[in-house]
Image (cartoon, helix red, strand yellow):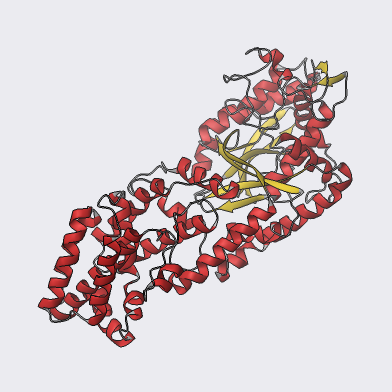
Amino acid sequence: MVEDIYRIGIAIKDVKNDTDTDIEEDIMPDLISKKIDGVILINLSFTNHDCKYNGLTQADYGINNNIAILLKKKSPNGPNYGPSAQITDIGKTLSIKIIGWFKDMLNRTQELTLGKEDIVYLASILDTIQGNLQKIIDDYNTLKLRKGSYILSVLINGKHPVNNSVIFNCYAKSIRQQYKGSNVGVCSLCNRKNVEIISKSNVFKFYTHDKPGFISGGFMESMSWRNYPVCKECEIILSRGKKYIWSKLNFPYVDMRYYLIPSTTSSYAALSEIVFLLERLTHKAFSFKKAYIDGQKTVEMDIWDVLEDEQDINSFRLLFVQSEQAGSVERILLEIKDVYPSRIKRLHRAKEEVDNSLGEKISGFNFSYLRYFLSKSDKIMERKDLDKIFLDITRSIFLEEKVDLKILLPHFMRNIRQEFESDETTSRYMNTLLRAWACTMFLIKAGCIKTERGITLNTIFDPLFKKYGASLDSEIKCALFLTGALVRKVMAIQAYEISSTPFRNRLRGLKLRPEQVKGLITEAVQKMEEYEMYSKASNQIVETIVQLMLKTPNNWQLSVDEINFYIVAGMTLMKEIYALCGETQEELKSEDDLLVEKV
């Protein structure tokens, strides 16, 4: 991963930057990729060694001031490299990040070679901010800012930190100080020998020196440079590559985000092609909103339209990173290596096949269907506790690893049962079933779920089994599928005849066991006969169910979740099943619409 980011840093060296500036690259401030709602400036005036506080000034965060405020993160528990920080708690941010910065500079006067006038200048500003600490907090609270993310910085005599020579020099020297005391060795990126290796790289926030693992030099921070030796020049390139990826190749994945990192084993002569690819990806990203609004494709799938045309000599990494403590800490949630364009083509084909099979029943498959089931194990929870399994499935999808459907079924059925119990109409739980069915179909067509075999029974239902055969790969599953249609038919008849559906209770909250299913079929036939509505179509379905069950061993080898999943699938697709038996659309509509309206 690091090598790929380094190569991108080389590739984009001559790419025009959105923020042209005279600041040297090694001390370039952070360009925050996430949305910042504004900048709050502590307005100070300094004349004749006298500093005064003049209130707070609000400004938009954008191309005019993202460099000017010199926001470059350093430590989550201490000041940054400059007197600017994202606001968490105004009191803490002011004390730790702003006041703390001026104190830190005054404690390092010799190290930073500050002159007497510079020391007096910084001390005067520090005294003024400390003396007005509570007033600054009160002024901030009266701003009545809308909920969002804001940055706190200083404005002295109308100048931002970048235009204040004392502050800028302290900022630059603090950054470059990290390169002092370097060690001599071989750079792991450029492979040059006998070069100065920086003692501690701050490019990646997930790189630490105090966590267990196989590391050179034990837990001695002074020896940690041996783990991944990088020279100063290469760290600048690495930082450039990371900034580009973090800001330009950062894409949504349902309620998460991922970084897309092109990876190639080709020579540096091919780097121009990589730059071209990066530019295409960047421009494509800007069209996401329109695609999303139009409802043609989801944001997370649209990006692959570009990638699927690439050759397999290039692969891609998907990096899911969670930022914490206002971006000072980064944690890798998932890294997916070696995702090839040919795999992307396969996933696109799988999506198209699912969409074609389910037609208007779904709005178009996307990864939010999976996330719907793999977010929270209980809807009332605040925390999403199913992130790990969702990311595990994501890895399997992109790498064509096998997924056990039995792992997903409990999550499918949990949501289906909740909707079934709480919904007075039939629409919601059936929509939930269709989501689950689409997920299953997609995983099978993507090669992630292995099916047993196709079912050919020479019956009128064979086309339906083929069309929706996401996992209808055994006689018993097909029998349960048809049983669901029979059950819903009874409920539709009851809704039409008596304006209620007491037969719904026979489903036992969708926790039916094998012996209960067999009894359910008999009861369904009896109920239809009671209402004198046991049609030729229903009889044909019952005969097929019996035929399928006779071919099935007594031990079905299906879990309760599997049994009820296929029954609900049949309930959802009842109209199509009965239509194959010759029932007219008028008959189906009159009964089933009453079921939806009255139940």
Residue at 51%, 42% in the rendered image: 392
- Looking at the rendered structure, the number of numbered marks drawn on it comes to 0
Q: Is residue 438 left or right of residue 350?
A: left
Relative side of 275 to 443, left or right: right
Going by the image, does 553 lie left or right of 95?
Answer: left
Q: Quadrant of residue 128?
A: top right
The percent coordinates of residue 224 (x first, y second) are 69, 17
Residue 547 is situated, as x and y percent measured from the top left of the image, at 28, 66
Is 571 drawn above or below residue 179 in the view shown? below
Q: Is residue 229 above or below residue 480?
A: above
In the shown orientation, is residue 119 left or right of residue 483? right
Q: Residue at x 57, y 20 (%)?
A: 211
Q: Nearer the viewer, residue 155 or 280?
A: 280
Image location of residue 179, percent across then percent down:
79, 22
Q: Image quarter for residue 331?
A: top right
The answer to whether residue 65 of the structure is visible from this angle is no
**Can you give x and y, in whole percent of width and height, for residue 524 in the image?**
17, 69
Residue in the foreground of this view, choosing between 35 and 312: 312
What is the residue that sits farthest to the left in this orientation?
530
Q: Quadrant of the N terminus?
A: top right
Residue 449 seen in the figure: yes
In the rendered image, the vertical position of residue 362 relative to residue 44, given as above or below: below
Image quarter (top left, top right, bottom left or bottom right) of the C terminus: bottom left
